[in-house]
Image (cartoon, rainbow, N blue to C red):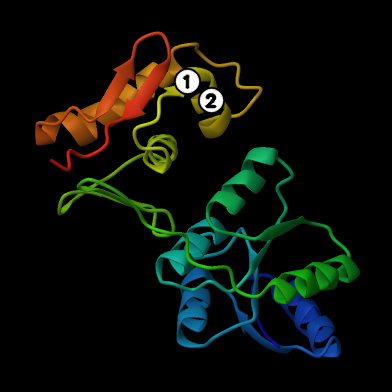
């Protein structure tokens, strides 16, 4: 089993390397984001241990770049941040698991064993509805041949609509899927974000595909096959 450790703290990196070697892994070390990206795209790894705070670009960005480059090795993120939003950011970036520092090496080794048993996950399916195309792994969206930049929340909302084309989705369901069950923000947040999507994906292209279903919520129009 071959593992890449991306960690800028030399002492931590060598402790991890020594422990993983004793566990029977072959270990490569990288000390910043660009170096980690180079290693991971040049050679196959059974798992990647990835620190969040890295020079060059951070672990979140590195994880996104790995997935965008088709690297699907399981990623275990190490973070000194205990906040839920930071852990969620890592998972949304494509990580498979995380550990908050300080951690025990025994737990890290156990989590790595669990990840390597699973093997590499399959690349998420690209969603296509009419001339809309959404790549979940690369976090990119196109209308026809034109790429459109979306914020993370806009991207999540469009993903939900494209996963259920022609289906009327209630505002409650959208909030639970795109935000969370306990979301306590403004009550019109769904309407605001639908408006953002329409301004980016419908109006510039002379389209009206994101439909309002009166008294219910919103629906992405199915393409006209006639």
Number of numbered discs overlaid on the protein picture: 2
Which residue corresponds to the image point at 42% horizontal and 54% vertical from the top-left?
136
Q: Which mark is residue 42?
A: none
Along the viewing direction, whichever of 65 and 157 lies nearer the viewer = 157
**How far from the left and from the top, in percent, is residue 142?**
24, 50
**Which percent across, then down, holds residue 45?**
60, 83
Q: Is residue 1 above or below residue 130?
A: below
Q: Quadrant of the N terminus?
A: bottom right
Mark number displayed over residue 170: 1
In space, the residues marked 2 and 1 are separated at their CA atoms by 5 Å
As drawn, 197 above or below 78: above
Q: Helix or strand or loop: what does disc 2 sit on?
A: helix
Q: Are marks 2 and 1 in contact (CB under 8 Å)?
A: yes
10 Å neighbourhood of mark 2: few (<14), some, or many (≥20)? some
Question: Nearest the camera: 46 or 18?
Answer: 46
Secondary structure found at label 1: strand
Percent coordinates x, y for residue 222 in the rendering: 27, 36
The residue that mark 2 highlights is 173
> Residue 88: percent from the left, percent from the top?
62, 45
Residue 218 to residue 23: above or below? above
Quadrant assignment, res 100: bottom right
Which residue is at a point 51% across and 83% down the rendered structure image?
39
């Amino acid at each position: 089993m071959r593992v890449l450790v991306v960690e800028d703290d030399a002492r931590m990196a060598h402790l991890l390397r020594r422990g993983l070697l004793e566990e029977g892994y072959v270990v490569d070390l990288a000390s910043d984001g660009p170096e980690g990206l180079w290693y991971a795209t040049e050679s196959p790894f059974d798992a990647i241990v990835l620190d969040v705070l890295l020079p060059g670009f951070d672990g979140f960005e590195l994880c996104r770049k790995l997935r965008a480059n088709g690297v699907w090795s399981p990623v275990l993120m190490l973070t000194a941040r205990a906040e839920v939003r930071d852990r969620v950011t890592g998972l949304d970036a494509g990580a498979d698991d995380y550990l908050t520092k300080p951690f025990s090496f025994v737990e890290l080794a156990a989590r790595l064993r669990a990840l390597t048993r699973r093997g590499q996950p399959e690349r998420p399916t690209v969603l296509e509805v009419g001339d809309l195309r959404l790549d979940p792994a690369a976090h990119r969206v196109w209308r026809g041949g034109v790429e459109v930049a979306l914020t993370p929340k806009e991207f999540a909302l469009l993903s939900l609509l494209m996963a259920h084309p022609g289906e009327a989705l209630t505002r409650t369901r959208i909030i639970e899927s795109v935000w969370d069950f306990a979301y306590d923000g403004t009550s019109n947040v769904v309407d605001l974000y639908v408006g953002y999507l329409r301004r980016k994906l419908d109006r510039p292209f002379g389209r009206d595909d994101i439909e309002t279903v009166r008294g219910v919520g919103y629906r992405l129009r199915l393409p006209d096959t006639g």
